[in-house]
Amino acid sequence: MTLKLIARSLTGLAALGTLLFIAPGYLPEKSTTVQAPARPNIIFIFSDDHTHQAISAYGSKLAKTPNIDRIANEGAILHTNIVTNSICGPSRATLLTGQFSHVNGYKLNEKVFDVRQSVFPEELQKNGYQTAWVGKMHLGALPHGFDYLNVLPGHGHYYNSDFVNSKNETVRYPGYVTNVITKLSLDWLKQRDESKPFFLVVGHKATHREWLPDIPDLGAYDNRTFPIPPTFYDDYNGRLAAQDQDMTIDKTMRLKEDLKVHLDYDNKGAFNGYNRFTPEQRKPFQAYYDKISQEFDDKKLTGKALVEWKYQRYLKDYLSVANSLDRNIGELLDYLDKTGLAKNTVVVYASDQGFYMGEHGWFDKRWIYEESLKTPFVIRYPGVIKPHTHIHQLVSNIDWAPTILNLTGTAIPSYIQGESFLPLLKGQKTNWRKEAYYHYYEFPQPHHVSPHFGIRTEQYTLARFYGPKDFWELYDIKKDPHNLHNLYGQKGYEAIMADLKKKLTEQIKKYKDDEALKLVDSKS
């Protein structure tokens, strides 16, 4: 594979003369007799936009997630796992490199990841591991370090999505994407070299917008009325950036494309792929949403009633998509049990960042604020991580790569900026970080969230917003977990602000964020 081909956007690979066909099947069955290697296998299940507020292991009352909960109960759950840049592609780049966005170069979505740089799966390969990534990758390129790739072009589609494999062939697989990703992952597990340990990323599209449920999950939450979040009608008082965003359920969420009201199924240019259904798929899908459209017409909603109806529909679709995600995780866990692989396989479930479930009237992510900043992370490793382990220390997604390397006995290269939190998982005392650094860049599209950087400590969040306006925000997370009251500049917080600014500057210098360093000391 040439560097030129690798660096091309995945969405354009079919145009490069690659083969596009409907897959008649996946891979043939193979014996499941397994002799586990001494070094652990790693399966990293990586979802998209699936927030901790929708996971019952984190105390969510919105939905039950028994299979994600199973990983948490049989191992560890991280309660303060944060990301360095709350957006899809950059989060995946951070996983692969163990670096901040300003170092790995992937600051924004829909760009091309620089495949010339090192990624940690290359270190696993040197240590004798087989490596694979199946499903969503969203980096616009095929990085090195993987023996097997079968990934979605861009975001892919929920129904009958294309995949791009290691040979640059674009293949369309019939079916619902979550099921297909699981099937392809299991096929690879059955065909791998069983004499070697493996590292497998199972990258799910779910629960990304526009939230198309699988046919069996249509209407799964129709008998539920979800409580309106206490901050749903936030007035954003004292928070300039929050006043000027474009991510509200009220104004930004679209009735047709997002909530499927009077949907145009034949729009050939639609990003969301509603025109990809087979007749057998479209019939029940359209029948269900035709009823929703009729309900909308009959109610003739306006004002708050309309906004709250949109909120209910959003959650019902989102959580129905999450049903399939959790069910497929259960299928993968069952396979590990059946084959005996579970005894020596580390299983991680994580999402690329947090997401808004109506808090502040929002959906999407991007902010340093709690609901967006924190992401779920549960991990089990029988015999090493004790069941029901709870980790409350600040862990960042720059730490994921070195921890995986540490678990496998692989040397951690110097380019990685994170640290292994394996000692925390083992319950060992360690001098762990007290603050974590964050930097978000994408502006003005698609949601008009102002660029900002800052730190999250055990008690406070300090953020410096820049472009188009320059200002600071400070929140006491213990007293104000929803980040509603900006304390910056208020009397009595002078010493706290000075200390946090000092810590922020130290973090910026430590991680060599030159752009932020120029801004942190400027007057604002």
Image: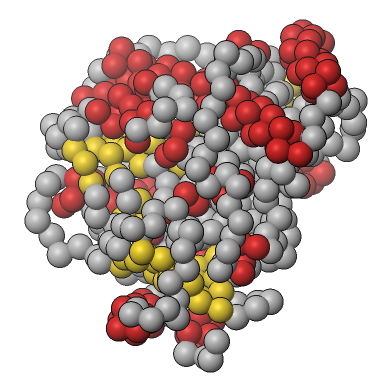
| Nearest the eye: 230 or 115 | 230
Left or right of 311 on screen, residue 124: left
Q: Nearer the viewer, residue 510 or 308?
A: 308
107 relative to 22, above or below:
below
**Residue for point 29% across, 16% down:** 337
Q: Nearer the viewer, residue 163 or 396?
A: 396
Q: Residue furthest left?
A: 429
Colour mode of the rendering: secondary structure
Residue 493 pos. (x, y %): 34, 78
* As drawn, 266 above or below 412: above
The quarter of the rendered structure image containing the C terminus is bottom right
Q: Residue at x 57, y 44 (%)?
A: 232
Q: How far from the left and from the top, in percent, is residue 221? A: 57, 17
- Identify the residue at horizontal 25%, vertical 66% (top origin): 434
Residue at coordinates 66% horizontally, 27% vertically from top-left? 313
Residue 18 quadrant:
top right
Q: Position of residue 314 (x, y in %)?
A: 64, 32
